Amino acid sequence: MLRKSLLFLLACTALLGAVLVFNTLRFSPPAAPAVGPLRPLNLPDSALSHFRQAIRYRTVSLEQGAAPDSAQFLGFHRFLQRAYPRVHAQLKREVVNQYTLLYSWPGQDAQAAPIVLMAHYDVVPVEESTAAKWEHDPWAGEVHQDRIWGRGAVDNKANVTALLEAAEQLLLAGFQPSRTVYFVFGHDEEVGGQQGAQQVARLLQQRGIKPEFVLDEGGFVTTDRVPGLKGTPVALIGTAEKGYLSLELTAEVAGGHSSIPEAETATDLIAQAVVALRKQNFPASFTPSMDEFAAHIGPRLPFVQRLAFANAWLLRPLILSTYTKTASGAAAVRTTLVPTILQAGVKDNVVPTSAKATVNLRLLPGTSSAEAVRQVQALLPDQRVTVKPVGTVSEPSPAAPTNATGYQLIEQQIRLQIQDVIPTPFLFVALSDSRHFQPLTSRIYKFSPMTNPAGLHGLNESLSVESYQQCFGFYHGLLKAAR
Ligand SMILES: [Zn+2]
C-alpha cells in the first residue's frame, strides 16, 4: 500500500514538473507589431541650448498653497515664446490659473478624438545644505560628460522642451496633426497639481472633450532595474498609478515635569504605534498591471525565473516573496507605509502632552483610502492613538488598456527610437498630474522617453544628451503617427 502511494506521489510530482516545464517552454511574450528600422532623429542645432536655458529658470514649487515666484515662472513663459516662435504663432495658447499652460493644435480631422500630451515645468527645490554637493551647478544647465545637469533636467523640463521642439520642427515643415493635440504644462505638479493640471482637466471636461488618450511623465527606459534583465533596455510604460494618502497619528497623555516621569507618555504611544505599523506589512498581491508586466517580461527572463512567471497560477507566492525583498519590488506589489514626520515636545525638561506622527501610504490599486484607514486603525496596538487623513488624498487609478491606440502608438515610437528595447506596461508607484484626467478617459499612460536618468528629487539630477535626443525623436514620431 505504502509503495503504491509512494509511486503515485512520484508520478504526480513528475507530472507537475512536466506541466511546469511545458508551460515555461511555450511561454512567449504578446505578439508585437513589426516596426523598424530604427528612426533616431538628430536634434536641431538650437535644441540643446533651449533645454539648457529652460533649466536656468528657478521654477520651484515649495509647498501646497505657497505662491510661485512669478518672475521665474512668467520668465519661463517668455522664454518659451522666444524659443518656439512658430508654436506661439500657430497654436492657441491659454494660461490657466496664471501659470499652467494649455496649447491647442487643431487636427485635420475635427471629428477624431484629440490627444493630450502633458509635462510639468515646476521643480522641487535644491536644499541649501546640499547645493555644494552637486558636481555641477544645479541651476546652470551645464553639459559635462555628454549629460545635461540641473534641477528639472529629468523631472520634468526635458519633456516640456522636447515636446515643443518637436512641434516647432513639424510646424516648420508645414505639418498639421491628424487629431487635435493638446499640450498641458503644469506649474504645480510637485505640490499636487490642484491649481494647474486639475483645473485644465476641468476646463477640457466642461468643453466636452473626450481624449483618445493622455500621455504624461512616468516610467523610464532602464537597463539595470528589472531583475534578470540587466543590460537590456526595458521601457516601463505606466498604465496605472498608485494612490496617495497621508495619515496623522495623535496621542494625548497628560505630561509634566521630566524629573518625575509617568510610566506612559504620549511619545511612548506614538513610538509604539509607528513601530507596530512598520512591522506589519500590507498584503502583497498582483494587480492587473503587474499581470501585464509579468506577461511581457516573464518570457524574456532566465529559465528559473521564467518558469516561475510561466506558472504564476501556482508560484505567485514565490514571485511575491522575491519581489517584497527589495524596496522597489515591494512598492510594485503592496500598499506601502512609511513615517515621514514626527512631532512632540518643546523643551528638554518638559514631558509633552501630545505627540504626532505623519505616515505616508501609497495605495495599491484595489485598496481605497477608506479601506487603508480601517486597516491602519486595526493594526494600532493602542486605540488611544487617533488616526486622521491629512492633505491630498488620491485614490489608486484603474489600469489603462494596452490594446488601445494610445498604448500602441507609444510602444511603436519606443521601438523606433531604441535598439532592442522591451516595452512593458507597469504600475507607476509615484504620482503624476495625469491622474486629474481620470474623469475624462481611462486611457492614461505615464512614460518619459529617456534612458537611465539620474538624480530625480535628489543630488546631481542629469540626463544624457542621447536621452534628450530620444525624447525629441519620440514626440516628433508620436505627433506624426497619431492618427
Ligand atoms: Zn515630475
Image: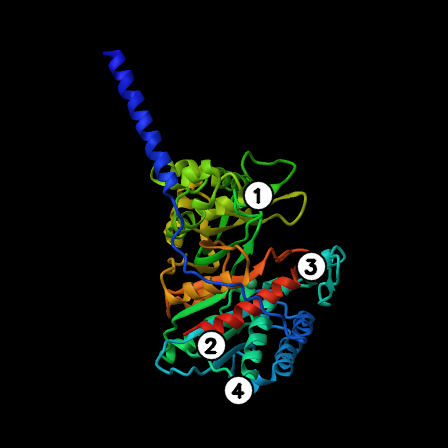
**Residue furthest toward the left?**
1
Dot 3 falls on a residue whose secondary structure is: loop
Q: Residue at x 59, y 63 (%)?
A: 155
Question: Nearer the viewer's eye, disc 1 or disc 2?
Answer: 2
Q: Is residue 382 above or below residue 237?
A: above
Q: Earlier in the sequence, mark 1 or mark 2?
A: 2
> Which SS class for mark 2?
strand
**Of the numbered discs in the image, which one, if any, rests on residue 90?**
4
Disc 1 marks which residue?
255
Q: Earlier in the sequence, mark 2 or mark 3?
A: 3
Q: Is residue 207 visible?
A: yes
Residue 127 disc label: 3
Q: Amino acid at mark 1?
A: Gly
Q: Quadrant of the C terminus?
A: bottom left
Q: Earlier in the sequence, mark 4 or mark 1?
A: 4
Q: Which sits earlier in the primary sequence, circle 4 or circle 2?
A: 4
- Side (left or right) of 100 relative to 483: right
Quick check: 138 left or right of 254?
right
Q: State yes or no: discs 4 and 3 in contact (Cβ < 8 Å).
A: no
Nearer mark to the viewer, of 4 and 2: 4
Q: Which residue type carries mark 4?
A: Gln
Mark 1 residue element: loop
Q: Which is closer to the viewer, label 4 or label 1?
A: 4
Q: Are marks 4 and 2 in contact (CB under 8 Å)?
A: no
Scheme of colours in the image: rainbow
